[in-house]
Image (cartoon, rainbow, N blue to C red):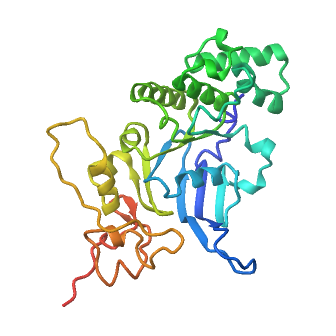
Amino acid sequence: MSAAAAVSADDADVPLVQIHDLIMHFPLRGQSLWPWDKPPMVRAVDGIDLTVARNEIVGLAGESGCGKSTVARLLMGLIKPTSGRIHFNGRPIQAYGTHELRPRLQMVFQDPYTSLNPRRPIGRIVGDPLIIHTKLSAADRRDRVVQALERVGLAAYHYDRFPHEFSGGQRQRIAIARALILDPECLVLDEPTSALDVSVQAVILNMILELQQDMQLGCLFITHDLNLMRFLAHRTAVMYLGRIVEIGATEDLFSRPLHPYTRALIDATPQPDPDRAADEVPLEGELPSNINPPPGCRFASRCAKKIDGLCDRVPPRLQSVQGRLVACHLHPAPEATP
């Protein structure tokens, strides 16, 4: 029985993943000649809240360097957070041993060219988790690996081939097969199609969507390509400079973005529609430093709609606005002064 099938009725209403006030600051070394000086901190993730439900794909979008991949590494337990809480199935993630957590929470990495060991055949790469986490015989393990390969569109005769014998799209299929071999409950996908051609991307995305529906996986899908997000995600969270600025149902967020940064991201995304009206929101100024971020809204220096004296001084909080969560002083609109 898979881990997902073993979820009790009491746990069914508990979000699969709960992230609360998660902070990850990295010390920046080499900035001083004196070893006793406290190094400046890179605020990669600076207090985010996010949930992933069962059988749901949550997208995490934002430009490069905003902290998306750091969130993935924190969720997988590859690094320890500075502070904050991560719960998996209602339990703190620190309460799980690695042997207990890994079969239930898996990750597909961004680059299929470096995430597979070039010295080992793919049958052994995909089958290694079965050696660690099951007591199957060698013959049964081979059968499971072949089934996993066939599930992602490969074949049994690929079992003894090496990664260099496959294309980029096929390597990503292998990485997905490895992540799904133990029937996990949750899958973290860190830009799994960014290194692939557009035509291959479509095939991989359709395969991910079919597997997610068949296995009822909870997924965190990380990308900077909003077209992929709109196609795949049920809900989307938009991240800017270490903080989430808007969360909502994907179609609502795309049709009526509330945060100016979300609006700018959508306008900057190429659309296959020559008759699409150009209604771009210009981005002014430069991206602030995540070592010394501004005291107010982190997007204020680039926002054409900022409220002087408020946006540049008071940090906005995520609050419920029109059925979604938005961190912006424009929503709700400030009270007019007499």
Q: Quadrant of residue 147?
A: top right
Residue 55's place in the image compared with 26, above or below, is above
Q: Residue at x 64, y 51 (%)?
A: 73
Q: 55 or 128: nearer the eye?
A: 128
Residue 94: x percent and y percent? 75, 56
Q: Quadrant of residue 36?
A: bottom right
Q: Quadrant of residue 330?
A: bottom left
Q: 111 or 181: nearer the eye?
A: 111
Residue 69: x percent and y percent? 56, 51
Residue 291's place in the image compared with 235, above or below, is below
Q: Residue at x 71, y 59 (%)?
A: 80
Would you say 240 lies left or right of 51 here? left
Q: 269 or 317: nearer the eye?
A: 269
Q: Residue furthest bottom?
A: 338
Which quadrant is the N terminus positioned in? top right
Residue 333: x percent and y percent? 27, 74
Q: Residue furthest front?
A: 33
Would you say 334 lies left or right of 206 here? left
Which quadrant is the C terminus positioned in? bottom left
Residue 259 in sight here:
no
Would you say 336 lies left or right of 315 here? left
Q: Residue furthest top?
A: 157
Q: Residue at x 80, y 48 (%)?
A: 97
Residue 287 in sight here:
yes
Report how many numbered discs are placed on residues in the image.
0
Residue 129's place in the image compared with 261, above or below, is above
Would you say 189 lies left or right of 3 here? left
Residue 212's place in the image compared with 152, above or below, is below
